[in-house]
Amino acid sequence: MYSFLYSIQNMIPDQRKAEGATPPQENRNQRPGNAGGFERRPVGQQPGQQQVAKAGQNPKQHLRVYPLGGFEQVGRNCFVIEVDNDIYIIDLGLQFPDEDMLGIDYLIPDISSLRGRENRIKAVLFTHGHLDHIGAVQHLLPALHFPPCYGTRLTMAFVRKRLEEEKLTSKAQLKTVQFREKIRIGKVEVEFLRVTHSIPDSAAIALHTPYGTIVHTGDFKFDLTPMNEPPADFPRLAELGDKGVLAIIADSTNALKPGHSKSEKEISETLRSLIREAKGRVIISTFSSLLNRIEQIVEHAKEFNRKVFIAGRSMETNVDIAQNLGYLRAPRGLIRQVNPAMEKLPDREVLIITTGSQGEEMAGLARIGLGTHRHIAVKKGDTVILSSNPILGNERAVAKVVNNLSVKGAIVKTNQELALHTTGHGFQGDLLLMHRLVRAKHVIPEHGEPHMKAAHAELVRGIGYQENQLHLLLNGEILEFDTQGNARKSKQKLQANDVIIDGRGAAGEGQRVLNDRKIMSSSGAIIVIFRVYAESKRLVGDPDVLSRGLIYGSEQQEITREVVQTARKAYDEELNRGEKERKGLKRAVTGALYRYFDRKLDREPMVIPILVEV
């Protein structure tokens, strides 16, 4: 099927010609790899590029871009474009924690560098509705003073839902745009272009600035047989390339993988076959945001006369939004929430869609496997389908869920044996096609860890890009463009620290919190309580000791006695030196106990001295 991708390269000029565009003039100085029906010119040559500002004008006139997230990780996406005094932000996403980030819900971009400049923010532009692109809105929009937000219909519905949960909708300025609609925002004309991803209404964003056009691809792949939506807007991307694109910020997630990513149609056919052949109930776990996949499952359920039951809060929310907006169509009564009444139906008429494809402890599939789900208990002969790939670090959690389900008699199918999941991010062939369409002067690899972005850069070197046209940025690094369209990395670097969401609040000192939790998880904690006179700070008796996760069994009495002696000695010595400040006294005790535990137990517990004045 993907052999047709290369024929698209010949089709696109014909489509542009039919729309009245002037066909590109051929330049015989073609760079290697720039083949297939496109204008043949060296990479970076920009016919028709907009007039740029002249040298010597107001020094405040400039174009610069920088990421505040998403350039050192997959997630936490936030990219800033400054056009003179105006600021445009693309995406406000979250990042799910790594397995060593104990107790953390997620991380969000550090926007402290925008503090004091909130009145210059003209717009927040959203590429699509996944949480790694919109998940931080309820935390960051208030801090940004609620600038206008733009996105396609489904994307803005998901943004609205995030804000509703915190009762912030009335303060937000949410604006829905159509594909190819050009919107004037300050000095920039913004255009949303259709791309295919794993959620409907995904967009690349073109910003037509006075200095040149910048294209942000968002998350994308080129799927020629997408389910329930049109393919990417090949003609418009190529048309932008003809007119001249100054820079492209392009998805790097799968830059290491050769060829092209699988089509969603192939996954749909596998699911249909499994649902058709299942003798009992079918339980399918997938990401709640994969609405195209969910719609295909619903279609297959309808074909084989199965009722669809939805389990999981995020799944219920997303399906409800999609149905209300017409992105998920089903006859009345076909889709229901999981409830005890489904037990009255024959097993062959039941299909359950649930969350938990990543082995999350509290999600639906894990609770089904453990036998703790309120409404669903595994029956022998159930077919359980994991329509996903384990995210890096989740493999053991997923394997544990699979084992629990298998022990209870379920027939478990995963992507390891069948085509049950495909990525929403393009492989090398998709990336090359995007670059051959857009032909930007500068390439900024984004959305990925550093080795993914490096692979993306190596890929485009093969089609003629030079080192001064490739820009590998880290979070907080600034790329500045001069009036001639050249770019250089600024010596200035903005703050882009980890900002963690722990419960309902944001913690700016995220690394300190994580370090404390790692210490407690590996070595435990010990609290030493001193009773002291308010004026003299002299001790009243021996300190009390309370430990957790550190001292066990027979050693407890001996170590507690030695801790009391060590702590008292350190306190008295520091007091006799004239120190009466609580901070200094506590520092002396902490240091002495650290040395004691290192020598005695080869441990470094968290030491918490407390002074109570009497």
Image (cartoon, helix red, strand yellow):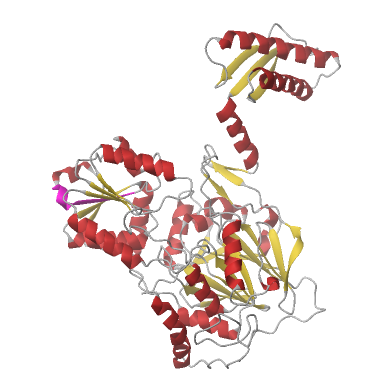
Image-based side of 455 in relation to 299, left or right: right
Note whether 461 is above or below 277 in the view shown: below
Image-based side of 384 in relation to 584, left or right: left
Note whether 480 is above or below 406 in the view shown: below
Residue appearing at x 42%, y 83% in the figure:
7
Position in image of residue 474 (x %, y %): 66, 58
Depth order, front residue of 142/424: 424
Disc count in the image?
0
Q: Is residue 170 visible?
A: no
Q: Residue 568 sits in which quadrant?
A: top right
Position in image of residue 3 (x %, y %): 40, 77
Position in image of residue 87 (x %, y %): 65, 66
Position in image of residue 456 (x %, y %): 57, 66
Image-based side of 330 in relation to 176, left or right: left
Region rendered in magenta:
346-354
Depth order, front residue of 467/375: 467
The single residue placed furthest to the top in the displayed view is 541
Q: Is residue 458 visible?
A: yes
Looking at the rendering, in which quadrant would you find the N terminus? bottom left
Asked whether residue 350 is drawn in magenta, I would say: yes
Asked whether residue 38 is drawn in magenta, I would say: no
Looking at the rendering, in which quadrant would you find the C terminus? top right
